Image: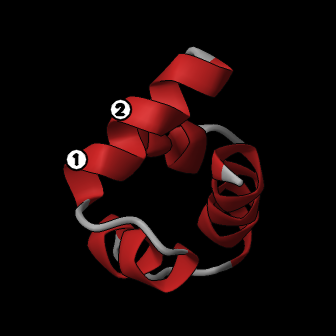
């Protein structure tokens, strides 16, 4: 379940300009920090790093 949420968040980071906090809530995390924690655990990158990459 967490992997699917992170995958969806990764897609949204690449395709939208939504704030990380908004994406976290939309994909089902209770807070942006929880998204960041799980995102980093699974991808070894933070959402901010994904957003900054070309």
Q: How is the image coloured?
A: secondary structure
Residue 36 vertical placement versus 21 (above, below): above
Residue ranking furthest to the top: 44
Residue depicted at 35% across the width and 82% down the height: 22
The secondary structure type at the circle numbered 1 is helix
The secondary structure type at the circle numbered 2 is helix
Locate the N terminus and report the quarter of the image it occupies: bottom right
- Can you tell which mark lies on residue 33? 1
**For residue 4, side relative to residue 47 (left or right):** right
Residue 43 vertical placement versus 15 (above, below): above
Question: CA gap, disc 1 to disc 2?
Answer: 6 Å
Residue ranking furthest to the front: 1
Residue depicted at 28% across the width and 67% down the height: 30
- Can you tell which mark lies on residue 11? none
Q: Which residue is mark 2?
A: 37
**For residue 15, side relative to residue 45 (left or right):** right
Number of numbered labels in the structure image: 2
| Towards the viewer: 26 or 46 | 26
Q: Is residue 29 visible?
A: yes
Pointer 1 with pointer 2, Cβ within 8 A: yes
The x, y position of residue 50, in whole percent, is 58, 40
């Amino acid at each position: 379940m967490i992997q699917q949420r992170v995958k969806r968040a990764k897609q949204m980071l690449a395709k939208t300009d939504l704030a990380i906090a908004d994406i976290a809530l939309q994909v089902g995390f209770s807070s942006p920090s929880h998204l960041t924690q799980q995102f980093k655990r699974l991808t070894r990158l933070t959402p901010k790093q994904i957003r900054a990459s070309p």
